[in-house]
Image (spheres, helix red, strand yellow):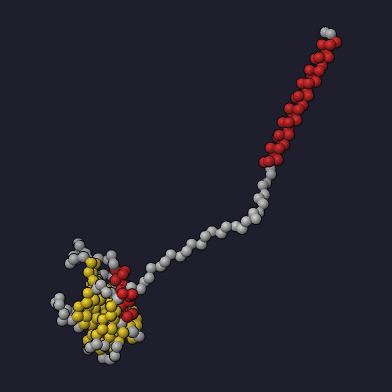
Amino acid sequence: MSKKTTISIIIALLALALIAGVVLGCKRKQEKVTRTEKHTTTIQEPSSQPATQPATPKPSAKKSSNLMSDWKTYTNTQMGYTINYPADWSVQKEGEPPYPGPPRGVTFSIRVGGMETVENPSYYCSIGISVSTYDDQSEMTSLENKGYAKSSIKVTGISATRFSKDHPGIADAVYFSRNGKHYRISRNRGFGTKYESEYKLVFNQMLDSFKFIK
């Protein structure tokens, strides 16, 4: 082998060694960068813009529980009282057609649907006011014996007794007395219950509207 060939081989080996060193160094550097990235925690700089607060929901409009805005007023000068009632309800005074009329007073009523049966209920409600010179103690005792809930309330500032039971027929009856007269305000309902919650509200607001005029 000539001296020139030997020198060429040595140069080639050195070049190969240099290239291998460069490749190995680059590989180690890349591995170091990768390990560093894995252990680096990113810290988010605070924004100069104020944080956006979630929008506060606006309260929905609550449906008014007062149904009396367009009601009419019934006045009984003979018995000395007034009471408000829904404008679209029928009013039947004692002795007025259609017969027979309500006993001892007046009846306010509404019916949605025809004459009802258990199988085909209509949505019926009547609120009656009766006045007499004798008390209704026997009737009150009968209602209590039939399981009606009994409570004490005030009607136009006067102590009254209320009986309630959720079933067709007499659903509410309120009794009170003044100046020797005995008053009963009662609510009758049919088999249908679709409007029962509204009818209860009407009854309570009619009680609140009852006033003596003498």
Q: Residue at x 60, y 57 (%)?
A: 51
The quadrant of the rendering that contains the N terminus is top right
Side of 199 where 32 appears, left or right? right
* Residue that lies at the very extreme toward the top in this rendered image: 1
* Residue that lies at the very extreme toward the right in this rendered image: 3
Side of 41 where 162 appears, left or right? left
21 or 165: nearer the eye?
A: 21
Q: Is residue 139 positioned above or below 5 on the image?
A: below
**Number of dots carrying numbers:** 0
**Quarter of the image holding residue 26?**
top right
Q: Residue at x 27, y 66 (%)?
A: 193
**Quarter of the image holding residue 103?**
bottom left
Q: Is there any visible trace of residue 48 in the rendered image?
A: yes
Side of 130 where 68 appears, left or right? right
Q: Residue at x 28, y 65 (%)?
A: 194
Residue 178 place in picture, x, y as percent:
29, 89
Residue 45 place in picture, x, y as percent:
67, 52
Q: Residue at x 33, y 73 (%)?
A: 67
Q: Is there any visible trace of residue 163 in the rendered image?
A: no
Q: Is residue 36 positioned above or below 107 on the image?
A: above
The quadrant of the rendering that contains the C terminus is bottom left
**Quarter of the image holding residue 104?**
bottom left
Residue 208 place in picture, x, y as percent:
33, 80
